[in-house]
Amino acid sequence: MVLLWTPVVIATICLGAGLAMWRFIDSLLTRLLSFVTRKDIKVEGTGFFYIQRLSVELGHATLVFQHFALNTRLRNPSAARMLTVSAGRVSIRAKHTGMKSANSDHQTTASNQRTAVVSGRKYFQRLKDFIVVNVWKILDVVICELTATIPCRMLPHTQLTISVTGGIHVSGMKQTDDRKHPLKLHVEVNTVSAKLHTLDKQQRVRGEKPKPDAELGLSVRVDAAVNPRQSLQTASVEVTVNPIAADANEVALAQAKVLLSGLAKRNNEQLVEQTATRKKDVNWFSGVLAKLPQESSVVIEDTKVKLSLHAGERSLSATLKKACLSARKRSVTPNDALPQLTVALGIEGLYANGTKSSPLLSLMRLRISSELIAGTSHLALSCAVNLDSLHTNYYHPELRFWSNTLRLSDKESNRSKSSPRASEDKCLQKLAGLWEGSISASVELSDCSVGAYQQPPVQFRDFPVAKVVLASVTANMELSPLENEDSNVRQMKSSLRLENAYAHIANDYGVDGQDDPSVLPLSRKHVWFRPFELGSLSVKAGLNASSPTSSLSTYHCDVMGDCTCLCLEWSSQLVETILVFADLLAISSPSQQEPSSPAVSLELDHQEVTNPLDHTVNSATVDIDIKVNETSLFVFGDRPGLDCVYLRQDALAVTTRLPDFNSLVVKQFGVAATTVVRISPRWLCLPFQSLDDPLVGITTLAITKANNVCVEVPQVYARWTATVHQSITERVMQLVNDLKTIQDIMPSKQRSPKSGVSLPSFSVKLHEVSATARVSSTTSVSAQLHGIHAQAVGLRITADVQHAVGQFDSHPIFTFTDTHIEAYTATDYCNALQKVRQHFPQLQLASNRAYLLHTKEARIVFPHQYDFGESVDQMINVFKFLKMLHRPNSPALDFKLWADVLLRADLVHFELQDDPFEVRLGDIHELMCDEYQQSLKRQMLLEEKLTELKKSLGELTTGMNVDEMYASLQRTNAEMYIARSQDCGFRTSLITFTFQSTEIAALADPTLTRLEAVTSHIKRVDPDSEFPEELNFSTLWARMVKGHCEKLEVSLRDYRQLLAIADDLSVFGMLMGAEQVAEPRGVREARVELSAPWTSATVRRSMPALKFYYDLDSNINQLEFAWGTSLEPSLAQVSLAFDLLSKASVDPSHPLPWWDKIRLLLHGRLGINAKHSNWHLMASLAPQTVSEQLEFDWSNFKGEWTNGCFQLHGDLDVNVRTASKYDDCQFLSFPGFQACIYLHWLCDGDANNHHSVMPCAPDKVLLLDQVKPHDSYAYFRSNNLNLKILLEVCKDTEQDMARPSCLLYASTLRFLQKLQVVTYAVTRPIRRGLLFDNNRPKKATLGRHYKDISVSISYPELKLDYWSSRVRKKGLCCSCGPGRFTGLYRLTLVSSTEGILRRTQSDWNTVRAHAEWNNVQTDVVQVVDGDEEGSACREDGCQQSHFLSFDRLTYDQDEKWKENEGFKHRLRAEGSKGSWNSFTRNVLFSLFDAYTKAQVRENATIEDGALHFTQRERFCIMGHAFLSWKPVAMSVIRLFACSQEMWLLLLLGTEERSVIPCTQWLCWTGPESVHTISTRTPNYAEIKQQT
């Protein structure tokens, strides 16, 4: 029995002993591990290579291993290694312990480890390294499962659960090929899952696990190559995370915000603590780099992250295909301040989606690499970023939601920003060590885009509201190190290269507005609705700066930029897009924003914490060199596909130095503007030279700034049309409104007013400027300017133009040479205008703004048959259109103070050109006549040569040779004629006005600006016209004017006689212009042509004419006029040419004659003072003849023209100019001559009431109910004119020698007869009929408009001398005392009764006439050798004899007498005496005989010349002289001639009927002392009886 139980007992004892021994071993192992690790470790049981439930207390957490076991390949042949350490289930439970204790334990453990390492021996270290390397060759570590539960102290009731269900596998391998890293470790963690739970109170009591707020799943693989002999800093670590899946909800997001805010608070507290204790860790950055492994990399693949809010209504997900972060350190030496480090980050396939899987971000590839090289003297840092295919979508509601959701609260964000100064100082402290090293960085971006949507996008190819595309960007930066310790200069170079960037916006215009990604900006094609396109941009910058350790530093920067294919576009759709995004972004002014909390300021000791970049800048300069090539700008309108303005610039170069801009140089090449039509979806941006007819073109523009700003442009041309102006105006107004709308939504900035700003001086040089305006389809106006130079110094502006031409329909009409323009201010007034103002003391202002225009030569030439008036009318229509467009509500009258104007011209040439066909025809006729004479001379020379040849050669000259010579002569004649016709120039002038040294000044003043002041002046200068009280004006102005002209010449064609000459002409006085407001019927409509999409614009034109009111005086040194019948054809053509200078009124009324137009338009007083005045009356029908004239020579001439009155005063001498020995014969001499001419216009209404005249538009005539034809001027139009002429010779008591006289020769009488024939000659119609397209009614002549003419002549005395010849051998001398003559003559137009269509004949009748002569005495004078009987000798040696004398002689004529008494003439002589002797008889007979012989000779050339006087039935033909304003002197001469013949017949009693030219007989009746003569038919028997 004992033996039976003995084994049991022994076994029991052994089992107990074994149990006791295992218990002892457990206790011993527990104590040993606790002693070694200084941790609280508990082991529940052990076994053979087995530990059961190992628990480790870490202070803040408890680590529990279910079991530890050591397996071998003997037990498990399938094991990969010889030994395998496996751990069962591992659990980690964290406790709510403070972070401070944990840190202290960590520091203690680290210190113990460092102590152990230091105390080890070298041989033990080698042994340990050998054991570690060889053990890891046969050892694997496997953890089957890991579970960790971590409660968060900062997040109450929040628990993080981490579980590794796939296990953790750690293995090692020895590397024989890598001696630096002999050991390679491999760690693999499979199926890691992390969950974040939030437990409420009930769940904690019940122990329930709620649904996780956040989940994370991943697998990790770590490969490390280490050297046991060295620290971890030399290891090579590779971490691979694959795959990653993360989900979170709003609870986890809120907890993450709380956690981040707590961390930010703790960092701020640590920063304040370090600043207060003045701790400065200079080696912070080097210490961080020293802890990194030698080679390390982290690879993340197949990552998916999703954030869901509001039960999945909102979601944000991201997908990452691959991400790699690697770092590599080079060998480190003790001398290196920092290790040499290379860091690289690579990301591929990153996608982000929003709610409903709307794409937000797509990144194909991103690589960031950085390298830090530490040398012995400096550091070198290089960084490179490569990004490929980045596409983002901006959906504002989505992004705004996530930005508001993910950002921290305002309180926490303000707290994190409470100490910006401290954070900045600490960062600058850490980066101070890098300043002395070199830095290089490069960035490359390709295929990037950002799209903005109003609706959530479904995929990336959807059309966004706006999209920004960037094809390629390359940027480089390089910062050079300090060369040595003494040098304080650093250099930085940077460059930027960008290609094919553009922005596109959506539109409402269909497919044509869609983007075409295949069309890139470098293709020079613009796709519509791309507001921004950039083909390429290259920027290079270099910076030279002193070291920040220097107290004073200088900066110099060089910037060079090159931009190509820049295209901008502005449209209403762009503005709408901006407004949409502004509304989404809720941009508001600062006053509408909530005030932010003030930042917390920290008191820092700047002696310790200093900013190394804070230093004093001594100087900073920047040199800029920018080039922009191929720039285009498009401005769209609201109408799709139509009105678009295109601006083009081929190149722009800008060179300057900042900040003073002293060396600014700007050059532009190929600037143009035009309009385009959007037909195709894209537009080819053509260069400047390839544009067809651009609106504006500038070849080159250069702007330089040194001491002043200088602008130079070689060539500028512009084209204008009303359609273009309408388009540009709408575009500008739209642009202004758009910018104002955008400015209203932008935050407002208050700008402080600038005081004391001085305007820079500038100069502008334009070599050639050409501008063309198409005012209608048939009319164009252009201007060409050459050599423009403008300068501005302050407010003083001057401009010089070398040559300027103004063209109308390609006709150069206005030409100006060497023009100078200058603008003056009121403070810097013009000296010339100051003198003019002193001439008018009634002006209120002493100075005013002024403009001076001075030109060397001004030519105004109007081509033949060019309708200039129509062109001007079209221009006025355009001006009205522009006024309606830009100032629709502007007042009719603007009573502002205008500037003074001074116009100067050395030479003004005004010319109306003649018909070139007629001129050429006349020149060719003269050439033919001259060439015919020359051909005759050449033929005579040929015949002489032939005669000589025949004499010398005889019969050897054949007929063939002679014929050839004549044929050659004919060819020579033809060739010479053709050559001469081609070379000869021909005249072009019809009439020419030449002004030399002309100056005109117009002065404005407040006294001439107000309405009341101007109307009072109008009433003063026009007192005869009744001024209506309610008269309104649309135009009203007044100026004081003063003009001067050294010489004025008016020439007609190429005639030798000038039409008018004025020397030293001065005009001064007041000039006013007024145009009254038109009534509704006086407004006509005109159309301005506009192309599509606009319709033609209608403008309202006022039909009342602009009237001039004046009070002017003029002083002239020499004044000459010329007129004659020979000039009337040319003057008629001049009248037709002047009609084309102004457009005729469209009023359907019959046009007003020129005298009624003068009455309507001109009102006031004009005074003329001339020292000498000559009036030439031409006595020849040949206009080229200047040898036959009757000259009226005035001395001290004074004239005045007022309403209906002409007053003339001066000394008048009438001379006869003939090409003979009788030239310069003084025919009449009237000293103190006065003439007053009164005009009385016979009208149906008041002749002076011109204010009541209102023209009527053609379309308004139909609205008026009229029986007879419409006439707007019915009551103003004159029917006839009554003329009253008062001629008087005043007796000058101071000068007894000067008295009226008349000198006659026999040739003078013949000259006067010829002058009468020439004057009464009828001219042919000029350029009338269908051939000349002139079917207008013939203009009425003033000579047929008279009705009654009243003439009154009076003189104190008169002396008449008649001589038979120039030698003055025989003659008559008649002296007369006071005399006077009055007469009334009436014009009657008699129609033709011959049955032929002819114009009415003018018939002048003497209504009544009265003449009176006192103390009349007639003597016969002859030059004889001795004394004759009955004669007396005069002082000049002539013998004279009394012939007849009268005390008083009167003559009366009345038409009423013929009806009552049978006669109408009455002659009464009182105190008549007569003498007859042989001397008298001989002289009179000789005079009569010479006269009759002259009449016979005249009859031989002129058939009815001698009968011209005898066919008159009226004794006094005085009135006939006023038929067409003919001189009065002719009538006086004819009267004396008739009287002479009648007295010879009476006294001599000859019976020779043939020599009696008079057809009337004088009868004597009455008492002896008084004789009355009446006229009737003569009876020759009675004559003989009475004789």
Image (tube, rainbow, N blue to C red):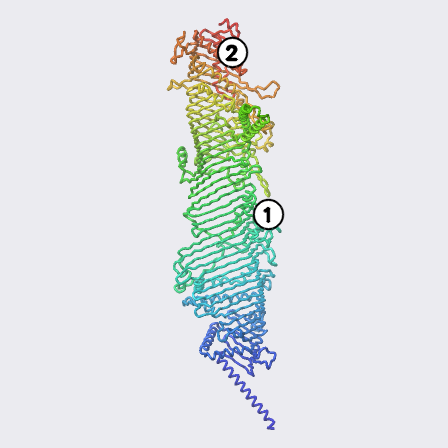
Give how far across and how far down residue 923 sits, in percent: 54, 28
Give how far across and how far down residue 865 sits, in percent: 55, 31
Give how far across and how far down residue 605 sits, in percent: 39, 64
Find numbered disc 2 in the image and state the secondary structure of the residue it sits on.
loop
Determine the residue located farthest toward the left in the rendered image: 1294
- 481 on left or right of 697: left
Using the rendered view, name the quadrant where residue 1504 is placed. top right
- 904 on left or right of 966: left
Give how far across and how far down residue 455 sits, in percent: 59, 56
Determine the residue located farthest toward the top in the rendered image: 1585
Find numbered disc 1 in the image and state the secondary structure of the residue it sits on.
loop
Disc 1 to disc 2, C-alpha distance:
94 Å
Which quadrant does the N terminus fall into?
Answer: bottom right
Is residue 289 visible from the viewing direction of this image?
yes
Count of numbered circles in the view: 2
Tell me the crowding category of disc 2: few under 14, some 14 to 19, or many 20 or more residues within 10 angstroms, Cα based.
Answer: some
Q: List the residue tagged with mark 2.
A: 1558
| Dot 2 amino acid type | Cys
